[in-house]
């Protein structure tokens, strides 16, 4: 039952409070409400530290206030709603309801607090109250004064990052054309060349290097022979197409090029030399040890290849092989191909029934509608944030005079001979370096940190090589600093048709000159695989052995700013030393999406710091390196539910109330009941799924509908299935984004308070709870 309240007269504040503090104006401020614990009753900065939810009592009456959420915003005002729990004096039962309110505010960046003025309740809904909620509302108004409130700016930044990620248009098509899939039954190595080979002289060595490849590949000018370095060995061939053979003693001028770490006996010296495969087109290796050994997956008509590192399956009813590459599915009647793309929605239903907790469950993140896929999409919305001093500078070193090319479908242009994205929009230029936007009036600078970026930039399509720059945002700015952030699209992970994929799938043109090569990120060739146990993408080094370990990159791009005085990452404990490093030239490491560079002289193959060995067929057991900070998704496994104790409640714009428990989302029903709504997508749900695997396959198949939890799972409340359960699961993913945004915002606020920044650094990393599980 709704109780309407007369709208108060609003007075415009002309003292500067209404300035565009938030980059996108009041919309940015409004999102403060969306996921900021303690918004309404936080009367001082210290009050922010009190547990959530917040409780106020007087004269025997008590009000518990839960998370506020935004509904709409106009000019300097926004409208939000929040769950309230009212217990009148002497009452035996509390009354749950929703209140709507409006507010206005401004920012004090020195304290990283937002001050909110003139909070006014405009409507209330207490459906279980006999008096239309008038008494409950009177209690709320008594304990909810209209004075000034404060709340952390970092809640706002985190909420905005989630909101913008969720609001991105999903209609821009990625490219799903299959690469050349090369099946081999013996040990093999795939050497990718970015188009036709570009040979350039190596100074003082009478050699030519193939610039446009991450491999160390050279040609002897005197003999015309090609030499390839890999894993402490040299291989030679008369042409790039081979055949390649092992060379025990290469010419001295060739051996001198190998990095010191490569000039040692191979760890696999006792094995036969691998077959070398060179490709000038996008390609992937499909390796099996001999003929494929397909083994059944219980409870399904699927079989998996037990003698392959690839995610290769055989579906008996269709007599088709299914292969997962970079998050995309392909199928073929023969492993020799031809392979065709399979939209995730067209996968056989048996993929949904792969047992959780089995090694093959690693692919469930690429099966739409599964908790793993929904969780992967939530993880793909996690913003990584930092504060940048306005005096941070940038130097863009073009290869020659700046050259620009139109961005198709827009009025903008991008630089084709720069080592990072440089975009012309109107009369100004914008560049992204290590997750920070810069702007200049000329392509040659001087460059300064951008306080805002034109919205036109965010219309760049995936077919453009600078598309990944559109996942970097400016959230807030003042005269001294700028708050910025990026979501995983900046590092190559994109939402697509209910799943996440790696890379856009486009083969972008590179830039090569006499001495320089700039290439773009690769979608294919490195076995990119999303691991739900890590919550991030793994990759396979280009020189790979069957059964070899892969690497999970845990990388915060902002860590590459070496001066802590200029860029402060929020996803790291304040005061900790920067443990990440990165080669000056990206030449031998294209695993991070974006541009990489190679020159005529050889450079060591140096993986980034915080790289972890990973066997994709087992759950990770090893802890991260000391000081390592996991990437964006890892914190989703370790955030605390309802950190202040009590229930974790959310209000929807239509007045429904939701509660998050370990096993799922519940909606408030009639008679003070909570009706099961949809599964939660977090770590608790994965633990539940793993535990359910001891049940027979038939029992695991859910008879209550596609959105309900596995049979035999402990539960409370009404678990009867609802119509449209899958749609409810998708709605629950949006609720989970709000849940994680609340938790992340709280953690970041604690680490970015002025007091926290000046405190001694703790030894454990902030994200991931100090280790990997």
Image (spheres, grey):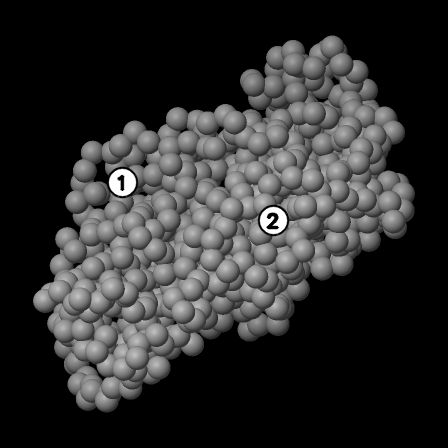
Q: Position of residue 678 (x, y in %)?
A: 53, 59
Res 635 → quadrant: top left
Residue holding disc 1 = 574
CA distance for labels 2 and 1? 41 Å
Q: Image quadrant for the N terminus? A: bottom left
Residue 356 visible in the displayed image? yes
- Viewer-proximal residue, 262 or 318? 318
Q: Nearer the viewer, residue 271 or 276?
A: 271
Dots 2 and 1: beta carbons under 8 Å? no
Residue 422 higher or lower than 560, as above or below: below
- At x 48%, y 44%, the residue is 684
Which SS class for mark 2? loop
Mark whose residue sits in front, 2 or 1: 2
Q: Which residue is mark 2?
A: 710
Q: Earlier in the sequence, mark 2 or mark 1?
A: 1
In the image, what residue occupies the spot 34% across and 39% down? 766
Q: Position of residue 213 (x, y in %)?
A: 67, 37
Callout count: 2
């Amino acid at each position: 039952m709704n109780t309407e309240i007369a709208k108060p007269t609003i007075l415009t504040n002309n003292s500067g409070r209404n300035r565009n503090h938030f980059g996108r104006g009041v919309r940015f401020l409004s999102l403060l409400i969306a996921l900021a614990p303690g918004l309404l009753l936080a009367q001082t900065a210290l009050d922010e530290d009190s547990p959530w939810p917040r409780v106020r009592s007087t004269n025997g009456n008590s009000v518990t206030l839960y998370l506020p959420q935004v509904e709409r915003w106009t000019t300097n005002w926004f409208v939000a709603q929040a769950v309230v729990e009212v217990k009148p004096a002497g009452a035996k039962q509390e009354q749950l309801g929703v209140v709507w309110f409006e507010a206005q505010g401004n920012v004090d960046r020195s304290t990283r607090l937002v001050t909110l003025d003139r909070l006014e309740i405009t409507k209330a809904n207490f459906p279980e109250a006999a008096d239309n909620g008038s008494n409950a509302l009177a209690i709320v108004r008594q304990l909810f004064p209209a004075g000034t409130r404060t709340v952390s700016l970092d809640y706002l930044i985190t909420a905005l990052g989630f909101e913008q990620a969720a609001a991105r248009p999903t209609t821009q098509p990625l490219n799903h054309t299959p690469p050349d899939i090369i099946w081999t039954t013996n040990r093999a190595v795939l050497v990718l060349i970015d188009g036709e080979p570009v040979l350039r002289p190596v100074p003082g060595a009478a050699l030519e290097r193939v610039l446009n490849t991450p491999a160390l590949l050279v040609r002897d000018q005197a003999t015309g022979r090609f030499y390839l370095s890999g894993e402490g060995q040299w291989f030679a061939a008369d042409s790039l197409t081979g055949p390649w053979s092992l060379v025990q003693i290469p010419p001295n001028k060739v051996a001198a090029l190998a990095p010191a770490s490569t000039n040692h006996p191979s760890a696999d010296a006792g094995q036969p030399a691998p077959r070398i495969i060179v490709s000038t087109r996008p390609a992937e290796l499909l390796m099996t040890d001999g003929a494929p050994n397909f083994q059944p997956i219980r409870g399904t008509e699927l079989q998996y290849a037990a003698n392959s590192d690839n995610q290769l399956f055989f579906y008996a009813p269709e007599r088709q092989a299914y292969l997962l590459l970079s998050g995309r599915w392909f199928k073929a009647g023969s492993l020799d191909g031809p392979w065709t793309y399979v939209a995730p929605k067209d996968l056989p239903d048996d993929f949904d029934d792969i047992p959780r907790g089995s090694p093959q469950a690693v692919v469930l993140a690429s099966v739409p509608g599964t908790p793993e896929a929904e969780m992967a999409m939530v993880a793909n919305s996690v913003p990584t944030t930092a504060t940048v001093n306005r005096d941070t500078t940038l130097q863009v070193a073009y290869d020659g005079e700046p050259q620009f090319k139109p961005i198709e479908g827009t009025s903008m242009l991008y630089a084709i001979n720069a080592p990072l994205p440089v975009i012309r929009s109107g009369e100004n230029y914008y560049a992204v370096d290590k997750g920070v936007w810069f702007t200049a009036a000329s392509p040659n600078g001087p460059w300064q940190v951008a306080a805002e970026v034109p919205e036109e930039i965010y219309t760049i399509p995936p077919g453009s090589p600078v598309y990944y720059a559109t996942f970097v945002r400016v959230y807030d700015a003042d005269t001294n600093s700028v708050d910025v952030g990026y979501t995983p699209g900046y590092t190559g992970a994109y939402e697509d048709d209910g799943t996440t994929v790696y890379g856009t799938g486009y083969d972008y043109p590179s830039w090569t000159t006499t001495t320089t090569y700039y290439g773009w990120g690769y979608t294919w060739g490195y076995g990119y695989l999303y691991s739900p146990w890590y919550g991030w993408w793994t990759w396979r080094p280009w020189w790979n052995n069957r059964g070899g370990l892969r690497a999970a990159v845990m990388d915060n791009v902002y860590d590459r700013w070496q001066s802590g005085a200029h860029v402060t990452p929020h996803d790291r404990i304040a005061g900790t030393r920067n443990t990440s490093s990165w080669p000056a030239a990206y030449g031998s490491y294209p695993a991070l999406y974006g541009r990489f560079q190679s020159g005529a002289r050889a450079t060591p193959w140096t993986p980034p710091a915080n790289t972890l060995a990973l066997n994709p067929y087992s759950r990770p057991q090893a802890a991260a390196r000391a000081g390592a900070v996991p990437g964006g998704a890892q914190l989703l496994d370790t955030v605390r539910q309802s950190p202040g104790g009590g229930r974790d409640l959310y209000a929807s714009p239509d007045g429904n109330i939701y509660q998050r428990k370990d096993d799922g989302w519940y909606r408030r029903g009639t008679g003070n009941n909570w009706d099961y709504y949809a599964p939660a997508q977090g770590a608790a749900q994965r633990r539940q799924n793993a535990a359910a695997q001891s049940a027979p396959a038939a029992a695991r198949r859910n008879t209550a509908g596609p959105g309900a939890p596995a049979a035999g799972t402990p539960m409370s409340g009404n678990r009867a299935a609802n119509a449209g359960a899958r749609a409810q699961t998708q709605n629950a993913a949006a609720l989970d984004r709000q849940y994680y945004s609340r938790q992340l915002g709280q953690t970041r606020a604690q680490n970015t308070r002025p007091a926290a920044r000046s405190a001694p650094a703790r030894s454990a990393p902030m994200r991931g709870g100090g280790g990997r599980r």
